[in-house]
Amino acid sequence: MRGQIILSHGSDSGPDATKVSALAALAETLGWRTQRPDYRADDARGYRGSVAPRIARLRATIEALDTPPLLVGSSMGAFVSGLVSLDVPVAGLLLLATPGAISGQVRAFDLRRGVPTLLIHGWRDEICPLADIHAFAAQRRLPLLVLDDDHRLGASMDAIAAQFRQLLDQLALAA
């Protein structure tokens, strides 16, 4: 086995969501172990109210592992993956359709410096404005792939999968 990947779904979604399911299947064919925490009970608390319980659930999942995982997240899953990376070691981050901020949250979006990171966003994201994550990526000099797609990034799965595979190859070589 190559390592562990934790894939976190967005709000109003679940662990069997299209993106996290497709990426988990790809990783597993390449010899990686995957986990997809179920945040639906946390999401029942509303958008702002789900952040803290999602963070606690993801931290507990990571702390049960032997080695730092790669975190993959979509939307709210990306937001909490970034924040959790500040508190526990991670091997890398792949963050899709990331909100730059969540109204009412004390902690602004941030992530651990020095780990392989790729941000992917849609030009036409109607939920999480591109400008927020673009400014964050520019400030940190992080790679940001912007695709001609909306928030769900459904039309871009082939491009996302190709980028994901490159990240997995990079992490495998570094191990």
Image (cartoon, grey):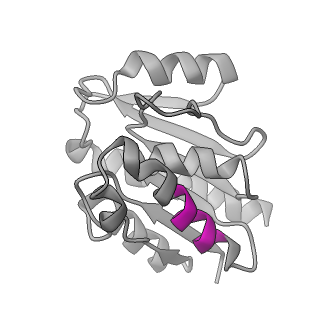
- Say if the magenta span includes residue 175: no
On-image quarter of the C terminus: bottom right
Q: How many marks?
A: 0
Q: Measuring 58% from the left and 45% from the top, which residue is drawn there?
A: 82
**Residue 84 sits above or below residue 60 on the image:** above
Depth check: give the residue in front, 80 or 70: 80
Identified at 62% across, 60% down, the residue is 169
* Vertical arrangement, residue 72 with respect to residue 16, above or below: above
Q: Nearer the viewer, residue 3 or 98?
A: 98
The rendered magenta stretch, by its main secondary structure, is classed as helix
In the visual, does 52 lie left or right of 141?
left
User: Quick one: 58 or 27, which is closer to the camera?
Assistant: 58
Instruction: Identify the image quadrant of residue 173.
Output: bottom right
Q: Residue at x 78, y 60 (%)?
A: 174
Question: Residue 57 lies in magenta, yes or no?
Answer: yes
Name of the residue lying farthest toward the bottom? 1
From the top left corner, tell me how far across and down residue 46 is, in percent: 29, 48
Q: Position of residue 28 (x, y in %)?
A: 47, 78
Magenta extent: 55-62
**Picture coordinates of residue 166, whole percent (x, y):** 56, 53
Looking at the rendering, which quadrant does residue 114 occupy?
top right
| Residue at the image position 42 percent from the left and 15 percent from the top | 131
Q: Place residue 89 in its image quadrant.
A: bottom right
Where is residue 106? Give x, y as percent.
56, 32
Inspect this view and state whether residue 173 appears: yes
Task: In the rendered view, tell whether residue 137 sits above or below residue 161.
Answer: above
The quarter in which the N terminus is drawn is: bottom right
Residue 74 seen by the camera: no
| Relative to 119, residue 169 above or below | below
Lateral position of residue 2 relative to residue 27, left or right: right
Q: Nearer the viewer, residue 106 or 79?
A: 106
